[in-house]
Structure formats: C-alpha cells, structure tokens
Image: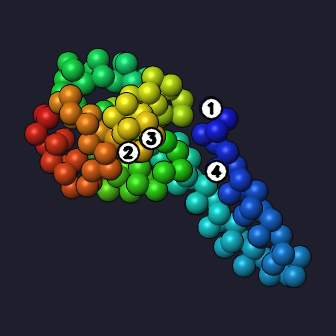
Amino acid sequence: MRRTWTGPVLLLIAGAGAATGPLVQGRPGTAAVLLLVFVLLAGLNSPLLFPRPIGALEAQRRSAVDGRPVVFWRPGCTYCMRLRIRLGRRARRLYWVDIWRDEAGAEVVRGINDGNETVPTLLVAGRAHTNPDPAWVREQLSSSR
C-alpha cells in the first residue's frame, strides 16, 4: 500500500519545493502554476484515476461468469494511464487488479510475462495480452456485452 502512494507524495513534495522559489521571489502566480502542475501529475500517478481494484482471484472468478476482461496494472505506469484515459467511462466495465496491492495478481503477471511485471496485462476470455492497444480493448468490451 505504501509503495502505491510513494510517487504521488514525492511529486507533491517536489511541487511544494519548486513553488517555494518563485513564491519567495514575489511571484505568487508562477508558484501557483508550478504547484498546480505537480498536483495534476501526482493525481495522474495515483490510484485515484483508476476504478477501485479487486483481488486477482475475485477478478478472474467474476470474469469467468460475465466475460469481462481483467486488467493487471500498477500506479505510475504510463501505459496503464494511457489505457485508462483512452477507455474513458468504459474502463469501469473492466476488472482492475493493482499488482502492488495484490500478490496473487503480481504472480499472474509474472507467470504470463516470463517473470517480469509488465503491465498493463489483460486477460480476455482466458487469453493474456500484454500492453494491448486501447482501441483493441474497446472492441473487446463491445463484444463482451
């Protein structure tokens, strides 16, 4: 859990440090813009951007019942953010497993990717797909209705 928030917290601290210089120099507007940029970066790198994660075993059980894909991800992953943002509201139809919170999920990803924790990794109809194109994932969501 702690590892999940390390990046966003460090970004907030860096933003406060970066904004201090302009603020001391009497440029509050520049300081506010810098701080805002770092707050946005921290938000993008936090788990808040993603739907609430569930455990790998539960996600796979639910997927077997309704056919919806399972996404294994981790906070701070640029490719995971790209997938999440490009899916928009459709992302809520997937089961999201945070591999930093769920050891079973991390084991699944390592088993699929030759021991590496490469994310995003999707399980669609029992088949694994590592770092798939977001357009392809949208197609899979359309066909799993």
**Of helix, strand and loop, which one carries label 3?**
loop
The answer to which image quadrant residue 82 occupies is bottom left
Q: Nearer the viewer, residue 101 or 15?
A: 101
The x, y position of residue 88, in whole percent, is 32, 51
Q: Nearer the viewer, residue 69 or 129?
A: 129
**In the rendered structure, which amino acid carries the disc numbered 2?**
Pro
**In the rendered structure, which amino acid carries the disc numbered 1?**
Met
Query: Compared to 60, does 75 lie above or below?
Result: below
**Of helix, strand and loop, which one carries label 2?**
loop
Task: Kindly indicate whether the residue at mark 3 contacts the one at mark 2 (C-beta within 8 angstroms).
Answer: no
Report, in whole angstroms, how far the alpha carbon at label 4 lies from the one at label 2: 19 Å
Lower position in the chain sequence, tag 4 or tag 3 = 4
Q: Residues within 10 Å of mark 3 (few under 14, many from 20)?
A: few
Find disc 1 in the rendering and name its residue.
1
The x, y position of residue 45, in whole percent, is 55, 52
Of badges 1 and 3, nearer the viewer stands 3
Of badges 4 and 3, nearer the viewer stands 3
The x, y position of residue 106, in whole percent, is 46, 31
Report, in whole angstroms, how far the alpha carbon at label 4 lies from the one at label 3: 23 Å
**Quadrant where the N terminus is found in the figure:** top right
Find disc 3 in the rendering and name its residue.
116
Report, in whole angstroms, how far the alpha carbon at label 4 lies from the one at label 1: 13 Å
With 79 as the anchor, is 4 left or right in this view? right
Of badges 2 and 3, nearer the viewer stands 3
**In the rendered structure, which amino acid carries the disc numbered 4?**
Pro
With 9 as the anchor, is 74 left or right in this view? left
Of badges 1 and 2, nearer the viewer stands 2
Q: Residue 120 got which mark?
A: 2
Q: Is residue 136 visible?
A: yes
Find disc 4 in the rendering and name its residue.
8
Lower position in the chain sequence, tag 1 or tag 3 = 1
